[in-house]
Every structure is written in structure tokens, then in C-alpha cells.
Image: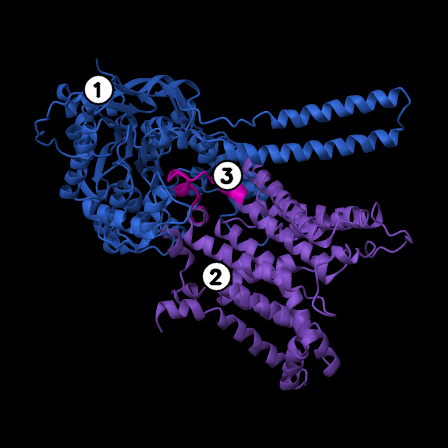
Chain colours: A purple, B blue
């Protein structure tokens, strides 16, 4: 097998290994593996409603992952993607609650773009905070990101239990439902918004092409591979790093917006649903390749959505999806980099010698 | 202990780090090991101390051939190495650090360790307090502890790598006395790896000089500095007749500049570089010449004095939004004062005041954040200003500083070009890099990843990426790793740049290259720059004195 083929097909290997291990596990507890996988598949794609549910989950996942393609190319560990999503969701909620609900005469075609725009802006600013802390304050983006994630969650909780609390009060669940015209147009009775899917796909295509073929993309690649050389070649590393983080944040903000405007209909306590962290995993698993990002995001959405049917049909708990996911992470870390798998092992002493 | 090295070779791929070195070390003597960076000193010492194995060759210990599996194995056999950076554990106590070497006991015997440490310290003239943390000690004191540890573990043969770098004069005196005592009273053997000729002259009985992996010779001390310098840098070549070159106006002017890093301070540099002129910077590596070059490129800011490129300093572009953080601060201060006034006049409750201040802090934070983003978008670093004003800089580290591993030659070409379109014109970039590949004789294709090129070709690639015309060209070791013919060709290309009016300043470890290519030469020694000499009026002897730190008029 040529190097090129190996490189492109390799992401399948950890997936197959994870499935194999899961099968063994299922057999070990005495369940029927065939029935289980059938249930998993049916749960994700069995009916059109379920398919759309899977797709509705997939869209924000894609948006986050697309943003992460940018930051990871630039060598930035944007762990703060969750917080950026939440800030996007808050910005959209503000438009829905304080503009759309207060001025019901403003039509949906004006409200929705405003919601998306503000969400992208809020996500970008939240990411800029992590970026500026890194560039100006020397705070690593991982630590900054984790702190800002918590801050975003606290902000949501404060809004839900404070200023944006529903009039009947008491519940800690979320705000009042947004007016109908402030929500993304949904397909039939599902939670899937075709508009958001088109947006996500278009952005993935655009970012994927831009990272490959534009000067901007090349600068990010150089930055991600060697900061010092890139700087000496003439790249303004600070500017590019902040730009990359802000773009990534804008996409995460959009994802948050899609979550509140289609999956939910109000600002909830946990609107991210772990999508940001899941997107990090997906992008790393896909090795920063756009097409694989798309496919793996779909697989993960299917796994998560199929879990409930597994529990209904077999005696297995729905956390089976979580187990498959966990195994995937493990196998990606172990075997994800095909070059490392095939390279002969180096002992510590040998590594030291190459200093 | 009697040690003999027989025909030691160590190859890293094509590179011959050690190429057939044979040496004998007798007990009761101090040996100096001299050589420029990359001469193979560290490789040889790493082999001798068990850090790495030689490709071939034999080490005889009292006549018996030995091999070491690790540094601790070598230490068990009596060979200890004192590294330039102490190999200790800063958060631990001195006694704990010492006890780590005895990992065969479950329980730690602190009283015994303290007693031993004090005893050993007294024996070797060190003052050691076992109850302090290692991190509170100076470099010199940590070195003493390391030395004591090595001796306690039975080292008969000591290798000291640049032991006087970064320690005080007093500590140096103590160290030297201890070294003499170890040799004279306890018949130990010491190898001193050093850059400093005067230390070698002061301490050593004999010195071995390496150059490009080969042993150039051994000398009994005392021996004139010039002879050592000649061994280190090579024999004097017949100097080719230089074409007199008409230099133009001043391009670069350094006025009383002080450049400071945590390791070295270079003070009071004054120099002037004209169009078409070549200035060579000589000196042992780490003597300050690189700091000067980097300061001229805008990578380091001088503490004092000025560096002017075409009459203007390299300050970088200040952002037009520099005032935004002050605006945020002013806003916050205003709101706090305002809220306080409202509160004291009873128009606001305490809670309202706190809320008002919190809201103001939020707004101020947002202003600060947006301002910071704008500042980073609109400012320019001094180095990028240097590039924009026609400066070229070629660093020494190829894959560390000059090239981006993971990118192809074509991609480098796109990044290095002064003009570019948003959508990359790959065809044009490929054509351009193809032209340069031909011109610079690079063995590689446009789509070759730079890390796949050999070292010499990486060097050529870095030079090929330079734009033209340039006002000033700053080079670190421009022909390192190139054969003579390639080096000549590269200098031929530099010559053409001179005719375009480019001023060139370069560092080289090769004294021949400096003498052959420069119009004028400045020599660095321990952070001090000599007066600038005309190449036509100097000699290897004079440069040798200057490199050794003697200022001749």
C-alpha cells in the first residue's frame, strides 16, 4: 500500500478497533452483538425523524469542528470552544428575548441573521479573550480556555436564574421559549434546520479550501509547524494567532446559536451538550482533514443518537455509545498517527542522543 | 586512572562528529579540550562519560577495553562528568539531592548524608549547607554540590564542561584551587572543556584541539595563544587578492549600543556599515557577535544606544490604537469616582454602587479586549519593519529558525516573497522556486519537504529564499556545512548583491572565511568587541590575540 493511500485510509483503523472491542464487550455481557448494532443504527437512522435528529445534532458539531480546523492548523489548542459556543448561544438568546419578543413586528428574515451575526461576534470575542491572554499575558490557551469555559457556564446559570428567569420563576431549567419567528425554520416536526446544515457545509467547504489554497491558510500552517521560523520568514505571529482564534470562536458561536435556535427553543443550563469537546476529538481523529471531519462528526452524532434505542431493545444501557466513544479516543491516541505506529520504537537513551 | 581513547569515531548519518580521535590521559594532570562549536568536543565527552556509544573505536581503562551502558555505569567505573547546566533537582534539599544517588535504601539516612556532605565540602574547600533547597543556591554552589556528589560516588576521572560560565570570580578561584588539589594530592585526572584560552593557559598541563571532528594536535602548556587559535580555526590560507570595492553611503549605524541577555552583556558597540561593504564578525561562539547581529535585525532591543538602518531606528510600528487600554482604565476610574460620589451624597445604595462598578468593569474589559485585538492587528514588530525596509537575516538554526519543517520549498517561496495574492498562484511560485533551485544548486524538487533536504541543501535553501535587492544582509554562518566549491559559489552570489549596494555583515566560525571575504573585521571576546580592523592590515596572529581576549593596538 502506498504511503498516500495509507495516510488517507488510516483513520478507519482506530474506528474498527473500537467497534471490535465493543463487540467483544457486548458478547461478554451476554448480549447479541447483531441486535445491538442494528438497534444502534435504527436509533440513528431508522426513521426519518431519527435521521433528522441525528443531522440536527451533527450541524453544530460540524460548525465547531470547522472552527477548530483553523485553530489547530495554527497550532493553537482551542479548548475554550465550549465557552465560545455558550457565549454565541447567549448572544442569540438576547436577540430572541430582548428584540424579537419585545418588538414582534420585526420579521424573521431580519431577526435570524442578527441572531447568527451576534452569536458569531460573541464567540469571536470570547475566543479573542483567550488569544489576548495568551499573546499579551503569556497564559497558555488551554488554561485560559478552561477558565473561560467555566465563566461562560456560570454566566448562563446566572442569566437563567436571574435576569432572564421565566415569570413563573422557580425552575432552574431555562428561559421562556423564544417566539416562533426568532427560531430557525425547522423541517416539519423535527429539530433539524436545513438552513443551518447548508450554512455548516458551506463554511466547511470555504474554510477547507481557504486553508489549502490561500496565503492566509499557508501562514497558519507555517505558524502551527514552527512559530519561530514562521516569524523569521515574516509572518506576524501575534496577529495571525488572534485572527485564527477569533474565526474559530465565531464558528463555535454559530454552533451555539444553532443549538438554542433549533435543537432547543430557549437558553438552557447545558446548551453545549459537550459538543465542543467532542469536536476537538473529531478534528484530531480526522487529522485536520475536512472530509474526514465531516464523516467522523456524522458517525459520532449517529452513535449518540442511537444509544437510546439500544437501551429500549436490548438490556444494555444507552451509555454503550459513550463506551464506543471512549474506546475511540483511546485507540486514536494509541494508533491514530500511522507514522508513529510504523516507526521503530525509540528508547529514551536514543531519543536523548538526538538532542 | 589511566585512560586511552583509540580511534574514536561517531557518525550521525553523513556527519562525522568524531573522526578517528586517539588520546591518552594520565593521572595527576589537567587536560584542556579546545575547539569551536561543532568541532566534536561534546560528542567526544558524551562518549567518554557513557552518555552515548561511539560508532567505532575503543576506550581503554587502565589498559582494559570498556564500554559504558549509561552515565551511571561510567560513574561506577570512575568517570564523572560535570555538565554546564547542573544535573540536579532544584526543589529538593541539598541533602535529598545528594541521597538520590543512593537509591538502594528504603530509609534515608539524613544525619549520615549531612555529615558526609560537610566532610567532603571541607576536604575540597567548599562551604556546603545540606539543609537548604538547591534552588536557593547560585550556579557556582550547585556546581560544587555536583562535584562533591561525583567525587563521593568515586569519580577518579572528571570531565568539566565549561565550568566557569556564569559563576563568580571568587567561586572560580575556589574551583580552580580544588581542581589543582584533586590533581596534585589525589592523583585524579581532569578534562577541562573550555572556550576560554586564558583558563586553559592557567590550569592545564596539556591541551588537545579538535576541529571538524578531527584531532588537530596536542600541545604542552604554556603555548602561545596564536598557535592554539591556528589549530582551532585552521591554517592560514594564501589570501586571494581582493578586488577593491567602492563602498557607498552608510546603511547601518550602531551608536554606543548595549545589548543584554541573561547570559551575556555586550556593551558600547559603535560601528558603521556602508553599501557594498562586507563586515566579518569573528570570535568564539557565544562571545556576543550573535547578539549584535540579532539587535541589528531588530530581534533584540538595545538597552542603551541606538541602531539605525538608513538613518532611522528600528522601533516597529506603534499601533494607532495604543491608547485603548488607557481609555478603558480612564472609563473605569471615572465610573468608580462617579459611583462613590453618588453613594456619599446618598443617591445610591451600597448595593447599587457595587452593581454600577461591576457594570463599568465589564464595559472597560470589553474596551480593553477590543483595543488589544486592534493593537495586535495594526502594530508591527521591529523585525518585520527591518524586513520591510530591505533587511535580510539568515539564522544559524536551519530547521529551528530558518525553515518550517512540514512545508515544501514552494510553500516557503510563497511565504518569503514580498508580494502575494490572497489566493496563492502556485504555478508562479513553483516557477520562481525552480529558478532559485537551479541558481543555488539545491538538490531537491519544488514539492520536497524541507526536512527531507540534506543539511547543506537546507543551508542553500535558506539563502535562496532571500529577496533582492536588499539594503542589508545579516548572516549567521552562511556557508556552514557546504563544501568549498559551493561556498565559493555562494560568496559569488553575495558579491553580486554587493554590486547592488547591499551591505553584508556575517558571523563565521571559520577564520579563513572571515579573512578571505571581509573588508573589515570585528572580533568579539567575552562580550567585548575589539576595534574594527582592516582585513588587508591584519593577520591570523593579530586575530588570534583578539579572540583570546587581548586587546592589541
3 and 2 marks on the same chain: yes
Quadrant in the picture for the N terminus of chain B? top left
User: Marks 3/2: CA distance?
Assistant: 24 Å
Q: Which residue is mark 2?
A: A289
Residue B343 covered by magenta stretch: no
Q: Are marks 3 and 1 in contact (CB under 8 Å)?
A: no
Point out the stretch of residues depicted in magenta. Answer: A222-243
3 and 1 marks on the same chain: no
Circle 2: element type: loop
Query: Measuring 49% from the left and 42% from the top, which residue is drawn there?
Result: A240
Query: Measuring 18% from the left and 36% from the top, which residue is drawn there?
Result: B493
Q: Main secondary structure of the magenta part?
A: helix
The spot of residue A313 in percent (x, y) is 73, 83
Q: Are marks 2 and 1 in contact (CB under 8 Å)?
A: no
Q: Disc 2 sits on a residue from what chain? A: A
- Please tell me the numbered disc located at residue A239: 3
Q: Relative to the observer, which residue lies in front, B91 or B58? A: B91
Q: With A159 as the anchor, is B130 left or right in this view?
A: left
Q: With A171 as the anchor, is A109 left or right in this view?
A: left
Quadrant in the picture for the C terminus of chain B? top left
The spot of residue A177 in percent (x, y) is 81, 57
Circle 1: element type: loop
Residue B219 appears in the rendering: no
Q: Relative to the observer, which residue lies in front, B427 or B395? A: B427
- Please tell me the numbered disc located at residue B248: 1
User: Marks 2/1: CA distance?
Assistant: 53 Å
Amino acid at each position: 500500500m502506498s504511503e498516500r493511500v495509507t495516510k488517507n485510509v488510516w483513520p478507519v483503523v482506530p474506528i474498527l478497533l473500537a467497534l471490535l472491542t465493543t463487540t467483544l464487550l457486548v458478547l461478554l455481557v451476554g448480549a447479541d452483538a447483531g441486535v445491538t448494532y442494528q438497534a444502534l443504527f435504527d436509533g440513528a437512522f431508522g426513521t426519518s425523524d431519527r435521521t433528522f435528529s441525528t443531522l440536527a445534532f451533527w450541524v453544530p458539531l460540524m460548525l465547531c469542528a470547522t472552527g477548530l480546523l483553523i485553530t489547530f492548523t495554527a497550532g493553537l489548542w482551542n479548548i475554550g470552544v465550549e465557552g465560545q459556543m455558550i457565549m454565541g448561544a447567549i448572544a442569540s438568546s438576547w436577540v430572541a428575548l430582548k428584540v424579537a419578543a419585545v418588538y414582534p413586528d420585526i420579521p424573521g428574515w431580519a431577526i435570524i441573521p442578527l441572531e447568527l451575526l451576534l452569536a458569531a461576534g460573541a464567540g469571536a470575542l470570547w475566543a479573542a479573550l483567550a488569544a489576548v491572554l495568551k499573546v499579551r499575558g503569556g497564559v497558555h490557551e488551554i488554561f485560559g480556555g478552561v477558565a473561560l469555559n467555566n465563566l461562560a457556564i456560570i454566566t448562563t446559570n446566572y442569566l437563567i436564574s436571574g435576569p432572564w428567569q421565566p415569570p413563573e420563576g422557580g425552575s432552574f431549567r431555562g428561559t421562556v421559549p423564544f417566539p416562533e419567528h426568532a427560531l430557525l425554520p425547522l423541517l416539519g416536526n423535527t429539530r433539524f434546520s436545513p438552513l443551518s446544515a447548508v450554512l455548516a457545509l458551506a463554511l466547511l467547504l470555504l474554510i477547507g479550501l481557504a486553508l489549502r489554497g490561500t496565503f492566509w491558510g499557508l501562514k497558519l500552517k507555517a505558524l502551527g509547524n514552527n512559530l519561530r521560523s514562521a516569524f523569521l520568514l515574516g509572518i506576524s505571529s501575534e496577529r495571525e494567532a488572534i485572527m485564527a482564534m477569533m474565526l474559530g470562536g465565531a464558528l463555535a458561536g454559530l454552533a451555539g446559536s444553532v443549538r438554542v435556535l433549533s435543537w432547543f427553543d430557549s437558553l438552557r443550563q447545558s446548551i453545549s451538550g459537550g459538543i465542543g469537546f467532542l469536536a476537538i476529538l473529531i478534528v484530531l481523529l480526522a487529522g485536520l482533514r475536512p472530509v474526514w471531519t465531516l464523516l467522523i462528526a456524522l458517525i459520532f452524532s449517529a452513535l449518540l443518537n442511537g444509544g437510546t434505542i439500544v437501551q429500549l431493545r436490548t438490556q444494555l444501557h444507552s451509555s454503550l455509545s459513550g463506551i464506543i466513544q471512549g474506546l475511540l479516543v483511546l485507540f486514536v491516541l494509541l494508533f491514530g498517527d500511522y507514522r508513529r505506529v510504523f516507526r521503530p520504537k525509540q528508547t529514551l537513551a536514543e531519543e536523548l542522543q538526538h538532542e | 586512572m589511566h585512560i586511552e581513547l583509540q580511534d574514536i569515531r561517531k557518525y550521525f548519518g553523513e556527519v562525522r562528529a568524531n573522526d578517528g580521535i586517539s588520546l591518552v590521559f594520565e593521572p595527576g594532570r589537567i587536560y584542556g579540550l579546545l575547539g569551536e562549536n561543532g568541532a566534536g568536543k561534546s560528542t567526544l565527552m558524551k562518549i567518554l562519560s557513557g552518555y552515548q556509544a561511539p560508532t567505532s573505536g575503543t576506550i581503554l581503562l587502565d589498559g582494559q577495553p570498556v564500554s559504558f551502558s549509561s552515565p551511571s555505569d561510567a560513574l561506577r567505573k570512575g568517570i564523572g562528568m560535570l555538565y554546564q547546566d547542573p544535573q540536579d533537582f532544584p526543589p529538593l534539599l541539598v541533602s535529598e539531592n545528594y541521597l538520590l544517588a543512593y537509591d538502594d535504601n528504603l530509609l534515608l539516612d539524613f544525619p549520615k548524608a549531612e555529615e558526609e556532605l560537610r566532610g567532603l565540602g571541607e576536604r575540597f574547600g567548599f562551604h556546603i549547607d545540606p539543609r537548604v533547597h538547591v534552588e536557593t543556591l547560585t550556579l557556582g554552589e550547585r556546581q560544587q554540590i555536583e562535584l562533591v556528589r561525583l567525587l563521593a560516588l568515586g569519580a577518579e576521572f572528571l570531565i568539566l564542561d565549561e565550568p566557569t560560565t556564569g559563576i563568580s570570580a571568587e567561586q572560580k578561584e575556589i574551583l580552580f584551587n580544588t581542581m589543582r588539589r584533586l590533581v596534585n594530592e589525589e592523583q585524579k585526572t581532569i578534562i577541562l572543556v573550555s572556550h576560554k584560552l586564558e583558563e586553559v593557559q592557567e590550569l592545564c598541563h596539556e591541551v588537545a584541539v579538535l576541529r571538524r571532528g578531527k584531532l588537530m594536535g596536542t600541545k604542552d602548556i604554556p603555548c602561545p595563544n596564536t598557535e592554539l587559535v591556528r589549530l582551532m580555526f585552521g591554517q592560514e590560507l594564501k589570501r586571494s587578492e581582493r578586488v577593491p570595492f567602492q563602498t557607498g553611503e552608510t546603511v547601518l549605524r550602531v551608536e554606543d549600543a548595549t545589548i543584554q541577555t541573561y547570559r551575556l552583556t555586550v556593551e558600547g558597540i559603535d560601528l558603521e556599515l556602508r553599501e557594498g561593504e562586507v563586515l566579518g564578525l569573528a570570535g568564539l561562539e557565544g562571545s556576543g557577535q550573535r547578539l549584535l547581529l540579532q539587535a541589528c535585525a531588530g530581534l533584540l532591543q538595545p538597552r542603551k544606544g541606538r541602531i539605525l538602518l538608513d538613518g532611522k531606528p528600528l522601533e516597529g510600528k506603534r499601533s494607532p490604537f495604543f491608547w485603548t487600554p488607557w481609555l478603558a482604565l480612564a472609563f473605569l476610574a471615572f465610573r468608580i469616582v462617579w459611583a462613590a460620589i453618588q453613594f456619599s451624597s446618598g443617591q445610591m445604595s451600597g448595593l447599587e454602587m457595587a452593581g454600577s462598578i461591576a457594570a463599568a468593569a465589564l464595559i472597560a474589559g470589553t474596551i480593553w479586549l477590543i483595543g488589544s485585538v486592534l493593537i495586535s492587528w495594526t502594530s508591527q514588530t521591529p523585525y518585520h519593519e527591518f524586513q520591510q525596509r530591505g533587511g535580510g537575516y539568515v539564522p544559524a538554526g536551519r530547521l529551528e529558525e530558518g525553515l518550517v519543517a512540514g512545508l515544501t520549498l514552494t510553500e516557503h517561496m510563497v511565504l518569503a516573497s514580498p508580494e502575494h495574492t490572497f489566493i496563492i498562484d502556485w504555478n508562479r511560485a513553483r516557477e520562481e522556486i525552480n529558478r532559485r533551485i537551479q541558481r543555488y544548486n539545491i538538490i531537491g524538487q519544488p514539492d520536497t519537504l524541507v526536512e527531507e533536504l540534506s543539511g547543506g541543501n537546507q543551508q542553500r535553501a535558506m539563502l535562496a529564499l532571500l529577496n533582492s535587492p536588499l539594503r542589508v544582509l545579516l548572516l549567521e554562518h552562511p556557508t556552514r556545512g557546504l563544501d568549498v566549491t559551493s561556498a565559493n559559489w555562494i560568496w559569488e552570489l553575495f558579491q553580486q548583491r554587493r554590486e547592488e549596494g547591499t551591505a553584508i555583515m556575517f558571523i563565521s566560525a571559520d577564520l579563513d572565511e572571515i579573512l578571505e571575504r571581509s573588508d573589515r573585521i570585528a572580533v568579539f571576546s567575552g562580550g567585548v568587541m575589539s576595534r574594527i580592523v582592516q582585513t588587508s592590515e591584519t593577520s591570523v596572529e593579530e586575530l588570534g590575540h583578539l579572540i583570546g581576549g587581548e586587546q592589541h593596538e
